[in-house]
Image (cartoon, rainbow, N blue to C red):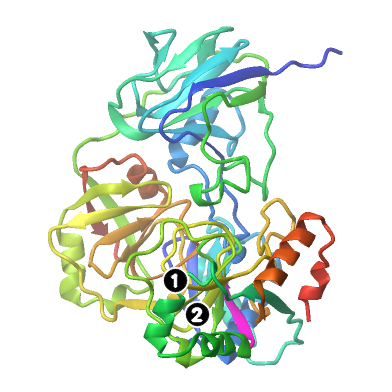
Amino acid sequence: MFEKIPIKLTLIRPGLYTTIQDNGRLGCQDQGIPQGGYMDVESANLANWLVANPRSYPVLELTMMGPTIQFEGACQIALTGADMGATINGLATKMNQTINIKNQDILGFGQLKRGLRTYLAVRGTWQLSKWLNSYSALPPQIIGQMATGPLKKGQVISVIVSNSITQRSVAIPSIPKSTVLLQVSRGPEYHRFDPSMVQRFFGQLYTMTNRFDRMGCLLKGVQAIDSVPDEIISSGLIPGTIQITNAGQPIVVLQDAPVTGGYNRIAVLGRKQRNRIAQMCRGQQLQFVDSKN
Amino acid sequence: MIIRPYGTEAMLVDFEQQIDSVIHGRVMEFYLFCKKRNSTAIRSIIPAYCSVTILFDPAIISYNQLKSQLESVAIGKTVASQKRTICIPVCYEPPFALDLREIMKQTALTAQAIIDAHTASDYLVYMMGFVPGFAYLGKLNASLFCARKAVPRQAVPIGAVAIAAAQTAIYPFSTPGGWQILGNTPIQVADLSKPELSLFSIGDNVRFESISLTKYHQIIQSIKRNTFDWEQLYV
């Protein structure tokens, strides 16, 4: 039997913040390790399905500005999530379908049109090593320790390709640019807020500020939310938690956030809602809806 | 013990809301019980000062089922103590005591009195968080209480030993941070490439020992030469 030679993806340009992600690492939060993992699970799962990879398989998560990738060897890929104007050898290519890649093809990206994060799946077995049972990149402050931070220029990913599949495609509604309504559960400190403040939280529109990354999103509402008292004794934080800062503005905690925090937790976003917020950019508006539980 | 939902896939178990070693003992008992159960329904556990957050899989167990199972846990018995005490050498001299002046000003103590107070007692690891390997140690002697820095540092030096209000800690990596820095340890407290990532676990005791600049560099050298006896840190 011949040994399979892996194909190679070389990052000619790394893009703004391109990371390898899978479902993240659960079970080690007692050691202070963030969960990590896909920011938009739905899009990542779809990308893997389009190339018939198993669920929870590693993908590339591209942020706002995509990388330029040269392929060495033929393979099948899929792109889902944000529309960054993807091209192959300079020609526009479609999202949400299996794409056949030839040897020496170059995958590029243009202007961000909708959403924030694009997922790139490549059919086959990725030649990577796991850390704490996950391939997910770590937050920037600790990448000095591990090789799995955001990808750099010239970095190479090797994939042992599996047999080609018949092309799959799916029609999904495009990511909205208008105001997004996000249903939330009540957080542990919900009842600490004055009813008038709860009403304010659900009644007003929030705008995404320029702080939106894998750790979380800082939002801005016209009227601040007062919380009494200001802080709690530091306690567990899970992705989706909405904290109210001392300045009265919400922070939505996401995948790479620290595992504990001290701000009052007014509400919690479910998984679906997290997928939505993971695709939102600076300036976009949203409103929270009380699911009453 | 109060159990409340925390979103649809987690629950929050609150103990009396105080930073206190006895209350933390209950947190530890409850945390270790959940951990030993090793149930696939429990995805992750986050123990903190006076709470435990449990992430569960709602496809395997409902909130109410898990709640009633956990409520029956007998808390309050003293568990056999497996606590380790780890002694961390710290150089409190320049160039490491970056915020000594500010700490002296805030506490109205002399430099020696600050070192004496910081090394006088054992600290409990109340919680692991902020970044991997960062142990929240408490409680600090009240004479050392300081407010955080008005403007946080962009990059705190690795190994910095710092204080903030009733807490003290060692920065395992160079990260942003707003705590007041009073020294530095030559000991690498976290190594993410090792199976045991951190020198500390929740529930451990930590003691600080004042060392000279010469000793600091000797330890750095022996760690580099691989001749450092890590076992000597455990007392």
Q: Which residues are magenta?
A: B121-128
Q: Is residue B43 left or right of residue A98?
A: right
Q: Residue at x 43, y 84 (%)?
A: B104
Neighbour tally class for label 1: few under 14, some 14-19, many 20 plus, Cα within 10 Å:
many
User: Can you give x and y, in whole percent of width and height, for residue B137 in the image?
Assistant: 56, 78
**In which quadrant of the rendered image does the N terminus of chain A lie?**
top right
Residue that lies at the very extreme toward the right in this rendered image: A1
Determine the image quadrant of residue B37.
bottom right
Asked if marks 1 and 2 touch (Cβ < 8 Å), the reply is: yes
Numbered badge on residue B179: 1
SS at badge 2: strand
Eye-nearest disc, 1 or 2: 1
**Residue on which the image places disc 2:** B167
Numbered badge on residue B42: none
Q: Is residue B55 magenta?
A: no
Q: Amino acid at mark 2?
A: Gln
